[in-house]
Image (spheres, rainbow, N blue to C red):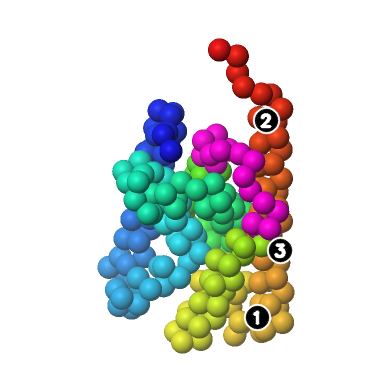
């Protein structure tokens, strides 16, 4: 699908921002003062939902620009995929702001990386979806399908957490919270994913209907 110049400029800009933020966060995590080995720290790095989602977002911004005809380029350009990534990164921003910002206060470069990953990129990806993605093609069942990624993430977090003793988020720390409280928070998070996803589909259908009602622009 041919991109308008504003879309290309927007995506190129925030693709660079996204990859740079991920690289900075990774370097900070495996810095010389960090405990443990690089392999273990790298696995932990990619066990954060924030990191996985920002990787998806950076790919979705990059591949339509440099490899639009590739399988990955076509996949990332599809309306359903872009809406799903907008959903995931919206939840990343909301979760950080509501549940994590009170228990962690990064400083210096960590503050910069944190702000880019949790605030700047969510806004950039959602605006990309609002401004540059075709409307009216999502279905009400799509948010249910989009739960596959967070559900798989919860499964991985349990496996990795019990194997390593390391948990990425306090609200998924089963040994600390117990199964009942951790299950409650997992349910809250899945409900948030579903609610935001339904909201995105509602917006998509409303904007799509508005575009159809307005009809073609006179020549």
Please report the bounds of the magenta region as a residue range: 128-143
Q: Position of residue 43 (x, y in %)?
A: 38, 73
Tell me the tag on residue 177.
1
In which quarter of the view is residue 195 placed? bottom right
**Alpha-carbon span between mark 3 and mark 1:** 19 Å
Vertical position of residue 80 compared to residue 128: above or below: below
Q: Earlier in the sequence, mark 3 or mark 1?
A: 1
Tell me the tag on residue 212.
2
Q: Tell me the quarter of the image containing the N terminus.
A: top left
Q: Position of residue 58 (x, y in %)?
A: 41, 50
- Which element carries disc 2, helix, strand or loop? helix
* In front of the other: 47 or 64: 64
* Magenta-span inclusion, residue 218: no
In which quarter of the view is residue 7 placed? top left
CB atoms of marks 3 and 2 within 8 Å: no
Q: Nearer the viewer, mark 3 or mark 1?
A: 3
Q: Is residue 186 left or right of residue 79?
A: right
Q: Position of residue 143 (x, y in %)?
A: 65, 58
**Alpha-carbon span between mark 2 and mark 1:** 50 Å
Does residue 17 appear in the picture of this structure? no
Q: Residues within 10 Å of mark 3 (few under 14, many from 20)?
A: few
Q: Earlier in the sequence, mark 3 or mark 2?
A: 3
């Amino acid at each position: 699908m041919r991109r308008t110049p504003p879309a290309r400029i927007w995506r190129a800009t925030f693709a660079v921002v996204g990859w740079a933020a991920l690289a900075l966060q990774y370097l900070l995590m495996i810095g010389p003062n960090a405990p443990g080995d690089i392999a273990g720290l790298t696995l932990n790095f990619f066990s954060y939902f924030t990191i996985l989602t920002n990787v998806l977002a950076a790919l979705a911004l990059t591949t339509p620009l440099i490899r639009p005809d590739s399988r990955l380029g076509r996949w990332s350009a599809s309306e359903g995929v872009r809406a799903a990534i907008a959903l995931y990164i919206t939840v990343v921003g909301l979760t950080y702001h509501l549940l994590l910002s009170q228990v962690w206060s990064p400083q210096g470069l960590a503050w910069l990386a944190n702000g880019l990953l949790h605030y700047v990129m969510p806004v950039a990806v959602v605006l990309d979806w609002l401004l540059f993605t075709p409307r009216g093609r999502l279905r009400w069942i799509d948010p249910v399908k989009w739960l596959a990624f967070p559900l798989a993430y919860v499964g991985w977090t349990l496996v990795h957490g019990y194997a390593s003793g390391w948990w990425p988020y306090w609200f998924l720390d089963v040994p600390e919270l117990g199964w009942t409280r951790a299950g409650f928070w997992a349910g809250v998070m899945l409900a948030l994913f579903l609610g935001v996803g339904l909201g995105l589909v509602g917006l998509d259908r409303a904007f799509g209907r508005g575009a159809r009602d307005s009809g073609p622009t006179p020549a």
